[in-house]
Amino acid sequence: MTASLVLDAGLIGGRSIRKSSRNPASILGAIVFPLLFFALFNIVMRRIMEARDFDYVQLLPSTIVVQAMIFSAMSSAYFVAEDRVTGITGRFRSMPVHPLAPILGRAVADVARAFVSLSVVLIVGVIVGMRFDAGIGWLPVYVAVGLLFALGMALLFGLLGYVVSTPEAAVSAASIPYLPLLLLSSGFVPVEDFPGWLQPFVEWQPVTATIDALRALAGAGDIARDVTLALAWSVGLIVVFGAIATRRVRSVA
């Protein structure tokens, strides 16, 4: 059963990657948008944060990486909904395909796109001054934490693709968790800058956990604590939404 899932998801993921590679908007989103956000926040916030003794060049790249992971994962909502509306999902059901393979295969394609975005952001981050003060040996862990988070979010957004009516509605629905999770996080300002009643949510939600873990791996935090929390969130997202998606896809016509 596990072998079937891996094989089927790999084949469907390959199809999704080929489909995305022929879409200029997908390539634009993977490379240009992360760089644009990086430049804008660096210009707007750098002097403000450095006036408060924050090394923004060191902290910002991890935020943009997590933002790119979410943005890459959001495409699952659109493409899963498109496959369902066009009948591809129904065709998969009539074939000897593992029920989780369609959404997992789409997630694999999104993780591949996320890897491109992560690589671009890290290269530019290093160019402008980011350093792995904790040791360059943590770089593979940094990449793994980011991509595991992308996988969990891709399953979440892929599930949205099964419950909305159209691909366009899927895009709108995907922005509902995206905006509050990113903006109400430690990504752009410290947790302490939020109202007291909101700080517990900001501190313990998955986006903050992942950003803090990446920053720790780059040398600004407690690696053991922050990475453990981030991995717990990512594995939880994968298990919970993978299980829900498996049940949902069985009922999709």
Image (cartoon, rainbow, N blue to C red):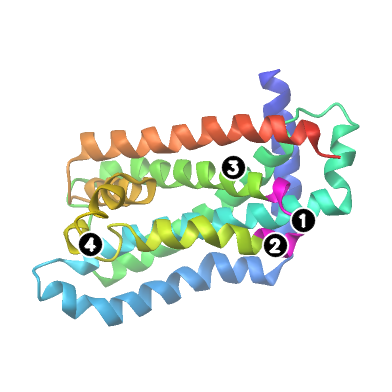
**Residues at badges 2 and 1 in contact (C-beta under 8 Å)?**
yes
Going by the numbered disc 4, the residue's amino acid type is Phe
**Residues at badges 3 and 2 in contact (C-beta under 8 Å)?**
no
The part of the image, by quadrant, that contains residue 36 is bottom left
- The verdict on residue 169 being magenta is yes
* Residues drawn in magenta: 161-170
Which badge, 2 or 4, is on the more N-terminal residue? Answer: 2
Q: Secondary structure at mark 4?
A: loop
Mark 4 against mark 3, which lies toward the viewer?
4
Residue indicated by mark 4: 194
**Residue 212 spot, x, y in % from top left:** 27, 49
Going by the numbered disc 2, the residue's amino acid type is Ala
**Residue 173 spot, x, y in % from top left:** 61, 59
Identity of the residue drawn at 9% across and 71% down: 52
Task: Report the disc number at residue 230.
Answer: none
Task: Report the disc number at residue 155.
Answer: 3
Which badge, 3 or 2, is on the more N-terminal residue? Answer: 3
Quadrant the N terminus occupies: top right
Q: Residues within 10 Å of mark 1 (few under 14, many from 20)?
A: some
Q: CA distance from mark 1 to mark 4?
A: 36 Å
- The verdict on residue 189 being magenta is no
Q: CA distance from mark 1 to mark 3?
A: 18 Å
**Residue 57 spot, x, y in % from top left:** 23, 68
The part of the image, by quadrant, that contains residue 54 is bottom left
- From this view, report whether residue 30 is shown above or below residue 104: below
Q: Residues within 10 Å of mark 4 (few under 14, many from 20)?
A: some
- From this view, report whether residue 64 is shown above or below residue 217: below
Residue indicated by mark 2: 169
Relative to 135, is 14 on the left or the right? right
Task: Report the disc number at residue 165.
Answer: 1
Relative to 211, is 225 on the left or the right? left
